[in-house]
Amino acid sequence: RYLDRIPDSLRATDGVGYAAQVERGRAIFASQCADCHAPGSLRVGRVEPLTDLGTDDARLKDFTPQLAAALNQIGTHEWKLRNFKVQNGYVNNLLDGIWLRGPYLHNGSVPTLRDLLNDPKDRPKTFCRGSDVINWKDVGFDAGPLNPAGPGDCGALFFYDTRPKKPDEDTGNRNDGHFYGTGLPAADKEALLEFLKTL
């Protein structure tokens, strides 16, 4: 659990105030996120259409009927894959342990949950991936310097660039879409982040 691991220096000192913040975040989650991400929701495990998500579609383009058919041949005498098929979007998942599952979106193009709650135009365009150091404030992993100029700025980490190199190029790294929660007031985003840490 997040709360078992957070450094003492970052723990909330006002237990009552912190509990109220988490409860506020729980209510925001219930109204903004639960339909797609809460246990028992009818939309958990269902494919969310790309037209609604607005996220990068490169993985969908790469997942051809031929690839699905090949995957459905994989197995042993004890198990077999059999239900892969081409879809028109991405599956809604539960958010258990979301604080430890960064970077975010299906292609790992957003370093922290705080960044995910920002409008896509305000998300980092480049960052460093591969760290195992938790970013306790923004929730995710330490992304090094945000918007580094190139691989040299990332040291031993991997330079991730969400921008296309040419106007017509699709690298599958875009960090647009998933506008859910991006329009919340700053205080609501803070409360939501505190609740997400408890999942």
Image (cartoon, helix red, strand yellow):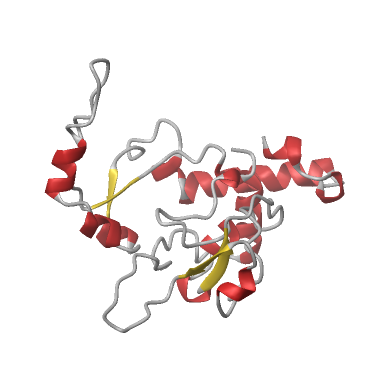
The answer to whether 124 is drawn above or below residue 114 in the figure is below
The spot of residue 64 in percent (x, y) is 16, 52
Q: Quadrant of residue 40?
A: top left
How many marks do you count on the picture? 0
Front residue of 123 and 16: 123
Q: Residue at x 55, y 44 (%)?
A: 98
Residue placed most toward the observer, 73 or 113: 73
Residue 128 image offset from top left, x and y in percent: 58, 65
Q: Is residue 191 left or right of residue 102?
A: right
Query: Which residue shows up at 25% across the image and 61% down it?
Result: 51
Report the front residue among 68 and 47.
68
Residue positioned most to the bottom: 167
Relative to 165, residue 68 above or below: above
Quadrant in which the C terminus appears: top right
Residue plotted at (82% across, 50% down)? 10
Which quadrant of the figure has residue 82? top left
Q: Position of residue 170 (x, y in %)?
A: 30, 72
Q: Quadrant of the N terminus?
A: top right
- Residue 109, how many percent across, how many down? 46, 62
Give 137 or 132, whichever is nearer the viewer.
Answer: 132
Residue 117 visible to the viewer: no
Q: Is 55 positioned to the left or the right of 100 in the image?
A: left
Above or below for 64 versus 82: below
For the point 44% across and 32% down, the residue is 39
Q: Is residue 98 visible?
A: yes
Query: Could you tell whether 133 is left or right of 120 in the image?
Result: right
